[in-house]
């Protein structure tokens, strides 16, 4: 006789369902276990400090040496003593020297004899081009036109004779034209020499040449010796080899 199984007693018929439910439960527990947050707790221990005895600290006493105050200033009182006059002193009256409105001023007439008149000689300067008689260079004779031509000729000879090119200017290749201004005074001497040029080396040499001019017969205007200003150009030029 074959034994038949009860369909209700079949244990394995819902095994898939149980497996799925169990799997979901495990996943849920795993998720909750991973997401669960825990915090570290520290045990705080509170102690109560009870002071039964009060501590007393000895503070040392320090002494500060304070200098004594300065003594008060002594006030010197002057004792005024009244002395009776023994001798009588005559007072001198000083008269004022100021002039008042009521004073009479003595008018003094100054005569011409008491005034001294001094004649002051004026230094008159007449240009070389318009002077009646030009300064006379040593060795020049003739009328005014001849003296003027001779003066200019002698001046050129003097420049050529005493010309010397400065060595420093040659080394530095300095050249150019220097204008020299000077005065032939009423005594015939050369004075007030001034120059204007491209460099001080050339100006110094030009002034040296003019200072060597000899004493001349001064120029005359209305037969009176006068000063005559004059200017001359000196050309400094290096020769190219």
Image (cartoon, helix red, strand yellow):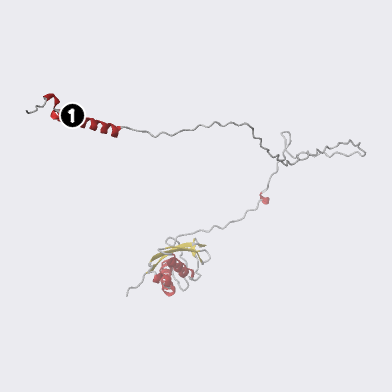
The secondary element bearing badge 1 is classed as helix
Q: Quadrant of the N terminus?
A: top left
Q: Spot the residue most to the left.
A: 1
Q: Position of residue 231 (x, y in %)?
A: 43, 63
Q: Is residue 2 left or right of residue 156?
A: left
User: Which residue lies at the image location 19% right of the left edge and 29% below the top edge?
Assistant: 21
Q: Is residue 120 above or below residue 60?
A: below
* Residue 65 location, quadrant: top right
User: Which residue lies at the image location 24% right of the left edge and 32% below the top edge?
Assistant: 26
Q: Quadrant of the C terminus?
A: bottom left
Q: Can residue 136 be seen by looking at this rendering?
A: no
Number of numbered markers: 1
User: Which residue lies at the image location 45% right of the left edge and 69% below the top edge?
Assistant: 205
Q: Nearer the viewer, residue 131 or 172?
A: 172
Q: Position of residue 188 (x, y in %)?
A: 51, 67
User: Which residue lies at the image location 53% right of the left edge and 59% below the top edge?
Assistant: 123
Q: Can residue 177 be seen by looking at this rendering?
A: yes
Q: Which residue is mark 1?
A: 18
């Amino acid at each position: 006789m074959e034994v038949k199984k009860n369909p209700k007693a079949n244990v394995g018929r819902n095994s898939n369902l149980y497996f799925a439910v169990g799997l979901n439960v495990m996943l849920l527990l795993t998720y909750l276990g991973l997401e669960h947050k825990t915090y570290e707790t520290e045990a705080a221990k509170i102690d109560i400090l009870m002071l039964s005895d009060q501590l007393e600290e000895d503070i040392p006493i320090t002494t500060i040496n304070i200098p004594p105050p300065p003594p008060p200033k002594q006030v010197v009182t002057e004792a005024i003593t009244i002395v009776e006059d023994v001798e009588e002193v005559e007072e001198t009256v000083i008269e004022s020297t100021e002039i008042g409105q009521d004073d009479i001023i003595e008018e003094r007439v100054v005569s011409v004899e008491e005034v001294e008149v001094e004649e002051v000689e004026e230094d008159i300067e007449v240009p070389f081009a318009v002077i009646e008689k030009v300064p006379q260079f040593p060795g020049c004779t003739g009328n005014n036109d001849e003296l003027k031509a001779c003066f200019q000729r002698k001046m050129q000879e003097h420049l050529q004779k005493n010309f010397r090119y400065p060595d420093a200017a040659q080394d530095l290749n300095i050249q150019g034209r220097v204008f020299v201004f000077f005065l032939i005074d009423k005594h015939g001497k050369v004075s007030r020499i001034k120059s204007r040029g491209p460099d001080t080396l050339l100006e110094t040499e030009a002034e040296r040449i003019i200072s060597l001019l000899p004493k001349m017969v001064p120029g005359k205007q209305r037969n009176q010796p006068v000063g005559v200003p004059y200017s001359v150009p000196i050309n400094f030029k290096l020769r190219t080899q």
